[in-house]
Amino acid sequence: MSELERALAAIHALGEPDAGAIAAARAHLDALTKPPGSLGRLEELVEQLAGITGDPAPRVDHPAIVVAAGDHGVARHGVSAYPPEVTAQMVANFVAGGAAINALAGGIGADVVVVDVGVAGAVPDGDPDTAHARLLRRRVRDGTADFTAGPAMRREDAEAAIEAGIEVARDVAADGAGIVGVGEMGIGNTTAASAVASVLTGFAPDAVTGLGTGVDAEGRQRKVRAIERAIAVNAPDRLDPVGVLAAVGGLEIACLTGVILGAAAARIPVVLDGFITGAAALVACDLAPGLPDRLIAAHRSPEPGHAIVLNRLGLRPLLELELRLGEGSGAALAIGLLQAAARVRDGMATFDDAGVSGPA
Amino acid sequence: MSELERALAAIHALGEPDAGAIAAARAHLDALTKPPGSLGRLEELVEQLAGITGDPAPRVDHPAIVVAAGDHGVARHGVSAYPPEVTAQMVANFVAGGAAINALAGGIGADVVVVDVGVAGAVPDGDPDTAHARLLRRRVRDGTADFTAGPAMRREDAEAAIEAGIEVARDVAADGAGIVGVGEMGIGNTTAASAVASVLTGFAPDAVTGLGTGVDAEGRQRKVRAIERAIAVNAPDRLDPVGVLAAVGGLEIACLTGVILGAAAARIPVVLDGFITGAAALVACDLAPGLPDRLIAAHRSPEPGHAIVLNRLGLRPLLELELRLGEGSGAALAIGLLQAAARVRDGMATFDDAGVSGPA
């Protein structure tokens, strides 16, 4: 049995979220000095976390943000506003603590774990004494091939990247993470995510392709054409999600599919970030039915494919702040809301304790 | 010159938000290692705070949540799911630290300042050694009169409640608050807020009246009828906002109008909470043109009047989480987002510092 098969079997064995834990969480929330349900989605989140973890008062302590990084052969077609070397430069920036995700992770007390699963260039170690992120070297290959001319990678590469992600999730779980946010870095990766989303949802490339981190209308047309060519050349089978990743995906997308599956298997709630993590979740959910109940959508970005993916997964985003950075930035903000929900659950008096009258 | 006139003159003297500070904030944000604007509304918030405060790197340290409390004569008409004594009980709960706002304020390092501007019953001091909120006794009268039979209060009472709020804002500013969130407690106050919103926006009572913290459809009909009667009996003049407060408002709503005006006059950004604080802001903005630029709408609640009020003010809410608690709970969550925005602004490396390439 492969790592992937073990993770899928573990998720299958979990079955439905824990109804007893959900009911206990609900009963506690209703005893607190506030009208029942008046904290809206914060209360729903407490119930969801209880169902996932089986704990009526689940901890959201020790969050981990896993940022998977990979390069994309398709970047040579002018699909990004940035040159490909930025992927490696930003990985170094994560380790040095200068990126947005470092600032946002600091606000929620999260560890940042960066996985080089497929960067093309050299990634220096950085200064271990001042590192602001843990760098895991799990490189499967030096970026993907240009998927307009053939598959992005071999099937074995996609499987290896998924399994790297499952192992990262296991490590993070062993370190005591109560919640995992996922993020990514990879110049060109909105193009790969749009290709995966197009194949798996059946929407046309044009419908799921946006401006990414900042191309213009012409750049968007180049993205659409590259995806159309990739699908024509590789003819991915939408009933074979791993094959789709190999044909038109990316190494960081495959790795995040593994992180999502591995965390879910360990009963750790997973907070998705933007469109690229949504594409990884789409693959994971095709592999593991019932998985969406274990996921939280942090936000909805302006990428048109993101709304399509979230609808397909049946996930309602918590935030809509026009975020289009990636790195797990939206996941970090959403974990802040989850921590606020946990504070409410743990910090409030009950009607009885406080001597407050209930409904008349 | 009254306190109110002084505050309005001070706001008028401020003029437009500081364009130089906004431009400096924008330039700094664009130098950071992320695509320009990719953090969406977080970046817009940094600019807005810069414009309000005149500081390109405004602090959101030492937040204060001001919770104004008052009772409502209209509560006798079955417009709330809770009995009127809950107002005083919840004030005691705020001081004892058992309410949702205490838990949420803890998460953002905020002081909770509770203003008894019009509670009807006795409010005990609580134990000063363990107080989780500062209780300010500024009671103008013991709740409002039943506004279905005459004015809620005298004009002098409304003015006194507004001036109490202005003074509270001045105290909070003197204590070094970098940002002020507003909240409220008052059984029956969604009915008063709907009445104020109906008069000032011109929408019918039925259009701006919802289920509050938990009445049923019949309860909502009682609210609508009470508001219709109040408007018929008192015939408030929509061009006289203070008169509207006196006729169909509430003491805590008037006090929050003062807090909003006082904080704006001191160049402190104000974060609105739900519908009732929105009604207070509507009055404040009718008194002080240009004020909406100095306000941040934390969230949009399910109350139908809230969306109408926010549209009228031209404010886009940051969150939409189905919150309907009040107390400043949504404001506290939004201040968490503002703190995250400030962390990004202060904590990130620039492209030059980090050796990251810009757009190709």
Image: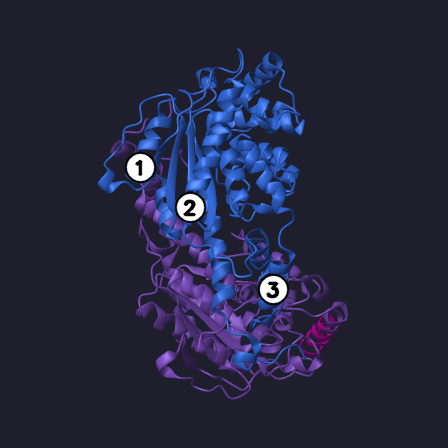
Chain colours: A blue, B purple
Q: Amino acid at mark 2?
A: Ala
Which mark sits nearer the N-terminus, 2 or 1? 1
Within 10 Å of disc 1 (Cα), the crowding (few <14, some 14-19, many 20+) is many
Q: Which residue is mark 3?
A: A24
Q: Please state the extent of the stretch shown in magenta in the rendering.
A: B223-234
Secondary structure type for disc 3: helix
Q: Crowdedness of circle 2 by 10 Å Cα count: few (<14), some, many (20+)?
A: few
Question: Is tag 2's residue or tag 3's residue first in the polypeptide sequence?
Answer: 3
The image quadrant that residue A237 belongs to is top right
Q: Nearer the viewer, mark 1 or mark 3?
A: 3
- Residue at horizontal 73%, vertical 69%? B216
Task: Identify the residue position indicated by label 1 in the image.
Answer: A95
State the mark number for residue A269.
none
Question: As drawn, is B327 to the left or to the right of A64?
Answer: right
Residue B15's place in the image compared with B232, above or below, is above
Q: Earlier in the sequence, mark 1 or mark 3?
A: 3
User: To which chain does the residue with label 1 belong?
Assistant: A
Q: Quadrant of the N terminus of chain A?
A: top right
- The amino acid pointed to by label 3 is Ala
Are dots 2 and 3 in contact, CB under 8 Å? no
Q: Nearer the viewer, mark 2 or mark 1?
A: 2
Residue B310's place in the image compared with A124, above or below, is below
Q: Amino acid at mark 1?
A: Val
